[in-house]
Amino acid sequence: MKHITLLAIAAAFTLPMQGQVIFESGFEDWTGNTPDGWLGVRTSVGFSDSVSQVSTNPHSGSFSVRLQNRLLPTGDHRRFTTQPLTVDSGVTYTVSFWARGFGDVRLGVFDGRPGNGYSPYTGYITVANGENWQQYELTRTVVVSTSEAEFILSVKGTLAPDHLIIDDVNISGGGSGPSITSINAIQFTTDPGGASPLAGQTVNTGGIVTANASNGFFIQNGGGPWSGIFVFSTQNVPARGDSVTFSASVTEFFGMTQLQNVNDFIVVSQGNAEVVSTITAVQANTEDYEGVLIRVNAATCINPDIGNNQWSMNDGTATLSVDELLYTFTPTQGAVYNVTGPTRYSFDSYRVMPRDANDIEVVTNVDELAFASVMLYPNPTSDLLTIELGTLDSRVAYFLTDALGRTVRTGSVMAARTNIEIADLHAGLYHITLRTDNAARSLPIYVIR
């Protein structure tokens, strides 16, 4: 039942109900060769007869407008825009119009938004109905409240004899808008391969931006499992802490669920707090936390360079890769770190990605004080490893990992002196991590045969 509900939510992503009408044009009134209310400053049709009055077979009234793109059908588009209109931020506007003839048309809006001021365009509609009229509806969401907005009919590939003929344009806004799909609904899955139940569908969603990459950004709804996701987009570059909404398609990219083909992107607010989920490395290696901003505490660097700009650490529960895609850091083998960042899945492994220097905390002074009296011997050793706590008066857990980061021994030091059997281990370098409730320390151990 849960998955049926989620699919129903995604299917509810439909055009908004019409609200207040802000513009109507039946192309009945012309000033010279120009239809009233059109040819705003963003128009780029380019030739004097590319926009012309048509009196034959109008949809209603006496006239309609012919749009002719003189470039080849495979060439660039040309903009036919309204005069400036007053619009409100966050409102989705529906542009309804009738068309006939032959050509491709799509919708955009100029509202002065950050960047180049233009919204992303809708996909092209191909009109190929000759003399027969057909009604179309397209929507765009405004980001900036302004009295200088221009709605754009972007035209390409028009063909003689009629090219593209438009009539009875209506622009309205303030309707109910599309349904919202949560990140949890997108990410939660029981599929063994981790695929989203909404893969291939278009959703309207949003969240708080937690990280930026060169090819997109991460967003999150709250914290915990299934709360984060990566958004593939090079056109939209929000800041960390921005609350954003947009529509996008849900896709699977080599096993990682992500959003792409972003439209109607809006920054709702700025400076929002990030939610960090403090978890263990074994939890970070699961589908549940893909895309989530996490923190793994007291993890020992067991390999400072595993290739592909990554290093590995182990907090006693599992080994986790640290990816330097967002921030480059040179770790020290055997050092202990608290590491924060969003997670991603790539090349069959999960990894955490620190975003800046604040995301990597070296665990030093408190460890040195807590473990100053602790002794481990003999080292190298062949059969037994002895741990003496000295003056440390606290429960201590230990984790022994091999050179590949695999945990080979775990347990607790229950007395002032504890022996660990290692006679069955192969010769080589190991690391033992000692951990209390508030501190951790890692040391190399050499097993000889």
Image (cartoon, helix red, strand yellow):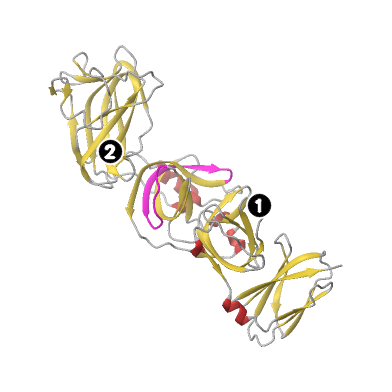
Locate residue 43 relative to residue 396 in the image: left or right.
Answer: left
Q: What residue type is labelled 2?
A: Phe
Give the camera-side residue of 438 and 7.
Answer: 438
Q: How many labels does the image show?
A: 2
> For residue 279, which quarter of the picture?
bottom right
The answer to whether residue 129 is seen in the rendering is yes
Q: Going by the picture, which residue comes out furthest to the top? A: 161
Locate residue 219 relative to residue 280 in the image: left or right.
Answer: left
Residue 430 image offset from top left, x and y in percent: 74, 67
Residue at position x 29%, y 17% from top?
A: 132
Q: Going by the picture, which residue comes out furthest to the front? A: 330
Does 9 appear above or below 97? below
Mark 1 vs mark 2: in front: 1
Locate residue 189 relative to residue 32 in the image: left or right.
Answer: right
Locate residue 252 relative to residue 209 in the image: left or right.
Answer: right
Sort mark 1 into few (<14), some (14-19) or many (20+) by Cα contacts within 10 Å.
Answer: few
Q: What residue type is labelled 1?
A: Gly
Residue 372 image offset from top left, x and y in percent: 65, 82
Q: Is mark 1 on a helix, strand or loop?
A: loop
Q: Going by the picture, which residue comes out furthest to the right? A: 449
Quadrant that contains the C terminus? bottom right
Give the camera-side residue of 128 and 394.
Answer: 394
243 falls in the magenta region: yes
Residue at position x 57%, y 77% from top?
A: 365
Residue linked to disc 1: 307
Residue linked to disc 2: 110
Residue at position x 28%, y 37% from top?
A: 109
Q: Of the residues under marks 1 and 2, which one precedes in the sequence?
A: 2
Label 1 vs label 2: CA separation?
46 Å
Does 277 appear above or below 242? below
Q: Give the range drawn in magenta.
A: 235-255
